[in-house]
Structure formats: C-alpha cells, structure tokens
Amino acid sequence: MCAYVLRLWAVPIFSRGWRLRGKALRNRRLSLFALGVLAYGILFPACARHRLTDDEIERNRLFAALIEREDRRTLGGDDFFRKNLEDSPYPQVREWCAVALGRIGLPRALPWLFGAFHSPYASVRAAAAFSVGKIEERDALRTENRAPDPRTVAALSELLADPSLQVQMRAVEALGRCGASPEANRIARRLDSFAYDHTPRGRAFLDAGMTALMRLKEPGTFPLLEKLAGSDDPEIQWRAVNALTRAGDRAACPTFLRMLQSENPEVRYYAARGLGICGDPGLSGRLLPLLPPFETGSGTPVPLPVRLAALQSLGTLKNPEAVSAIRAALAAAPVGGKDTDQSNFAIAATTALADIGSREAEPVLVSLLNIPGPVANAAAVALGKTLRAQPDRFFDIVRGISFAEPPAVRAWARALGELGGERAIAELKALLMKSANEPAGSAALLALPAVLDALARAGSSDLQQILLPYLESYDGVAVRAALAAYKPLPGAQAPWTPVLEAYARASPGTDVETKTALIDRLEPWIREPAVLAMLRAALRDRDRNARIAALRLLRMSGAPDLPDETGPAESRLTAGSYELIAAERRDRMTVILETTRGSIEFELFMEDAPLTADNFIRLAKGGFFDGLTFMRVVPHFVIQGGDPRNDQEGGPGYSIRCEINMHPFERGSVGMALAGKDTGGSQFFIATSPQPHLDGSYTCFGRVTSGMPAVEHMLPGDRILKVRIEEDVTAVDPRGY
C-alpha cells in the first residue's frame, strides 16, 4: 500500500534521470529535460502530480476481475467475457479477454472466440486465434478425452486470408496445434506463396509456419521445408533444418550436409543434429572435425553448441570409430578448470560414449571419474551402461570413489540401474535401507526416486513387493517414483487397490502432481466398480487437475451422467491480491540473480504473466531461491533452477496456474518448468537459445536483460547466492500512480 501511495503522488521525472527504485532515489546523470521537469515539479507541485485517469482505473478493475477468473479457471456466472470481448471500448481489454479464455481452456468459450475472429482490431483477432488453438490443441483433447469442435479448423483456415499478417501468423500457429494433414498442406501452400521481405514481421510469420509444420509432421510438406533451408537468411535456414529434424525427415540428409558447411554457427548446430536422425554410421566422418575446441589448421574456435550437436549425433549413429576422436577432443583442453565449455562438453561426451557402447570408451570414462562434481557423476552413469556385461569390472573401477553428496548419490543409483545384475541390485537395496533411517533432507532420502527407478531398470525380481511401502508413503515424491515402476504381476488380485489407497491418503492434500499421477495410473482398470466409485469421488477433489484426470477416465469408461465441466480451481489469492497485482501490471520489475557464475538480470512480464510474476516476486522476497542450485543444465537449450530438493522433483508446496502467452522462447527467455498443465511452482528455466517448440506451451514470464555469459557458462550444481527484486517506476510515465 505504501508503494501505491508513493506512486499516486510521484513527481514526474525523466526516465533517464532520477528514478524511483523501491523506496530509494538513485542519482544518475540528469538530462537538461529532466532538470527542467524536476524544477517544474518543485515550483508547481499541484501540476506535477499525476493521478490515474478514470480509464486507467477502469482497466485496472477489469484486469483484476479477469486474472481472478483466470486463476480460478472459471468463466463466471455473468456475461463478463462475452460483453468485454465484443463491446469493451478498450481494444486492450478485448485482447486480454481473448487470451484469458485460452488459458481457462473451457470449450464453452469457443463461440465467443469465433465471434472475435471478426473483431475490427487485428490484435484481438490474433489473440482469439491463439486461444482457439490452445483450447482445441491435440494434447488438450487427449488430456480431457473430448472431441474437437467441428467448426475450429474451418474458422482458423479462413483467417489465413486475413489482411493482417499478425492474424495469419496466429492462425497458422493454431492450425499447427489442432490441425491434420489437410491443414499442413494448406499452411505449406501459404508459406510457399509468401513474399519474404526480410523484415522482422515476415520472419516471424515464416517462423510460425515452420513450427506448425514441425508439429504436424506431414511428409508432403518436407520439400517446402528443404526449400526454405536454402534461403539466404540464416535465421530461416536453421529454423527450417530444426523443423526437418524434429519432424523426423531422414530423406533430408543432403540438406543437412549442405547446411553443415554454413559459416553461421546456428545453422551448423542444427545441421549437425539433423545428421543424427539419418541412421547412417558412415556420416560420422562429417561430424568428427566438429569435436575439437579449435579447427585443425586454422585454429578457429568451434562453438560449443556445434561440438555438442556433433556429440549427440555421433551417439545416435553409434559408430565406434568416433571414440578416439572424442578422446582427442577431451584431451585438447583441460576439463574441470575455469573452462566451463570443456566441462559441459565432457558431460555430453559421457552420454555419447555410453550410447555408442564400445569397449574403447572405458578408459575415457575412467579418466573423467577423477574430475569431481557433475563430470564424474555423468561418467559413473555412462560407465555403468558401458560395462553392463562386466559388473565385476565396474565395481573394481569405482572402488574407493566416494558418492556422498546428493547429486552423486543419485548418479550412483542411476549407474547401478544401468549396470544391472545381482550385485547392483543388492547395492540399491542397501541404499533403500539407509534412506529409511535417514533424516529428511539427507542425501540417501533425496536419492530415493532415483533408487526406485534404478531397481526397475536393473530388473529386480521382487520390485513390486519393494514398491508397496512407498506407495503407502505420505511423501508425494516417493509415491510418484514408486508409481512409475508399479507393474503388478499377471494374476495379481485387485492390483488397483494400492493405487486407490494411495489416492485416499493424498486426496486431502495439495500435491496435485501426485494425485493426478495416481488417477492416471488407474486407466487399465476403469471398468472395475471400485475404481469407478473412486473416480466419481475424485470429481469432488479440491484440485481441478485431479478432477480433470478423473473425468477423462470416466469418459473413457463410458460412465453415464457426467458433468461437462469440472468446476473452478481453488486459489491462495484474495480479491485484494488481484487488485494489487492489477495495480502493478505495468511496473518495471527487475530480478537480479547473484550466482556463482556472476550476476543475471531479467525483467518480469507483469502484464502478460501477472500471477506467475507475482509468485516469483513473493518467493524471491522471502529468500526461497537463495542457496538453491541450477540442477539441470543443457547447453544451447536451458538452465533450470528453483527446486529446494535440487533434483527436479521439488517445489514450494503449492502449484500455480499456467499463463501461456504469445511471447516466443528466444535466447534469454525465462519460463516456468512444469510437470503438466497448471503444475508450476518455483522451478524456472532460462533458455540459452531460441526454442520454438516451447512457444505457447510454457509460461514465458521474463527476459534476460544482462548476464547471458553467466547463463551460458553455468554447470550443474552452480548456485543461486541471492535474489533481489528492484522495482523501477519512472515518474514522467503517464502511468504514474
């Protein structure tokens, strides 16, 4: 409230001069204009103060009402959405409503969105197309076991002739999510006729089209993607090659080989990845020169992403001749020093060597065991896989090596799971016994999910008996780990009973991920009376995701008298919370992550992901992130942190709603990690390169403004030392409060 009052009477000052940051004024170089405005504010204070206009107050009121409905996943019992979508005098409010309807995801909203296709505002038509694609996307239909609306494809297809390229782009994107072969061919024809003018808008349209074709995987459109790969724009080239790779076009091998000669590192990266899907081990010779940190002869540095792509493809192609080249590339620069590129290369090399499966990989992996931390952990797992037929040799090699820290214990468990055999199973059971007597937070207890998964991989004959006590646990992580490995023996009596009992224990709580996993696991037995009774009871679960999962299975079973919708979601927020979030929707909030690799700053999208941004701010101000690690680091993809367990299984003890928006995932984009729709909490990721396949599937709630070198040099286990939030309100801005 103090911040609100301060903004209400803020003195207008030029944004490049004095600025309000939280409660302090930081002195910066004042422009002459800033000095003039400041003097004016001093001499004429009544004129210098700015109050919100009636229009701004009304927009804030509508924004608060709208995000409350988003958060509760309800359309409300009134006519709020239809009225504002069709008749609001504010185009911005109409656009908000269109986006919100996609987030809420109820098919009942489709007629309103179809009507918005005829809005006089292009931004509203574009948002409506985006949201129709989300409501009707294939994954949503599958999750809810419902049929698509027969009007969707035709209505979206009409928008391909819209006069606005922005609208066409969103229609193409939506058709990629909910269309089929005819729509793929229609999109291809539109792209083929498109006169690309090398503008950002034109590039964005082609990007959306190629991503749509990537999702549809229609072979008839692959020739167009190969044609686009021949563009003179490297941005179009790599996106076309990426689409061909993700769509699985093995016939595109000549295109990949041609693109491998590009001078653009992004194009070479995706071309190297593409060769991995071609299935020809003879292609390894074209990839081996990409492994060393410097080109032979010229001494030109080879970008780390290109080296990693070559490694990944070599592992897929499984040519043993690649082992010696990988060894030489590792020896070309120290591993484990200040050069994090070489350490990340070594971690990726362990996976490639294990995938190749050659005996010659053993000495390379053994040498990497001597580099403490994530390199040694990865090497141990790879060595277990490599020596699966020689378990005694594996144990001889690792004798004397300590696996004490939580990441190391998890790696040890995974290595044993890859190794298999009686001795490995005995070691894993010993880890289980140890975890039973350890306090919360201990390394052995945190490794429990990895141990249970490893026992399943190792083929423990008594696994199902071992799992039963963990299904009875009140620890959701343990329950999910046991559930993933639960495969009742043929002839078992009422094998659904442990799952029903586990759900009964979990249902009063808020662990929606565990409850949903338990309900989904009942799918094989949906016609059993006890299961049907439990599913009907789950329609009253406090968590909406659990109700959705139960309704899906009941629909599959053919049960009668089912509701069309599952009802609204619970929320931790109050009406006052929504009003405060709305009041801050256009503030500039900067997150400053102090990490062991340096400082990273990113701005929050307060208007496009308000609930997610507010949640992050609350956690950060409470010190939640301080001391946590980036437990997942995948170079040229993402770094991920925010997990108090540091194993991708933890969170703050609650979940928040997804706020899917139209921000693309580019280099530096900040997104929420998920285990399914509306399961975000505290885990977040920063993209280290563009990731078009994530667009519209995860909440993008920020963008890095400074510190990308720190992001790109991160290693697994690097820590977040402290997180600060800085609020930057420029008083000359007419939004001043």
Image (spheres, rainbow, N blue to C red):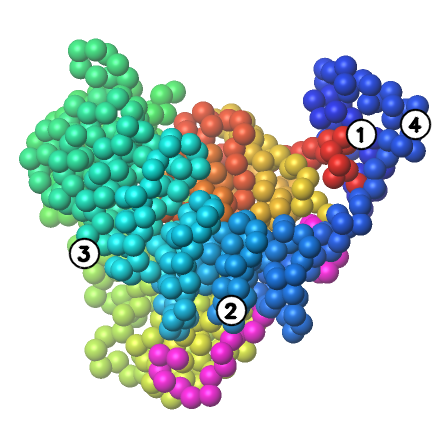
The residues tagged by marks 2 and 3 sit, at their Cα atoms, a distance apart of 61 Å
Whether residue 35 appears in magenta in the rendering, the answer is no
Quadrant where the image shows the C terminus: top right
For numbered disc 2, what is the local secondary structure? helix
Q: In the visual, does 405 lie left or right of 224?
A: right
* Label 2: how many Cα within 10 Å (few below 14, some 14–19, many 20+): few
Q: Which residue is under mark 2?
A: 111
Q: SS of the residue at dot 1?
A: loop
**Residue range highlighted in magenta:** 555-582
Question: Number of marks in the image?
Answer: 4
- Mark 1 or 3: in front is 1
Q: What residue sits 82% from the left and 23% below the top?
A: 37
* Residue at the spot of label 4: 44
Asked whether the residues under the numbered discs 2 and 3 touch, taking CB atoms below 8 Å apart as contact, a structural biologist would say no
Q: Quadrant of residue 236?
A: top left
* Residue 677 picture location, percent across and down: 46, 59
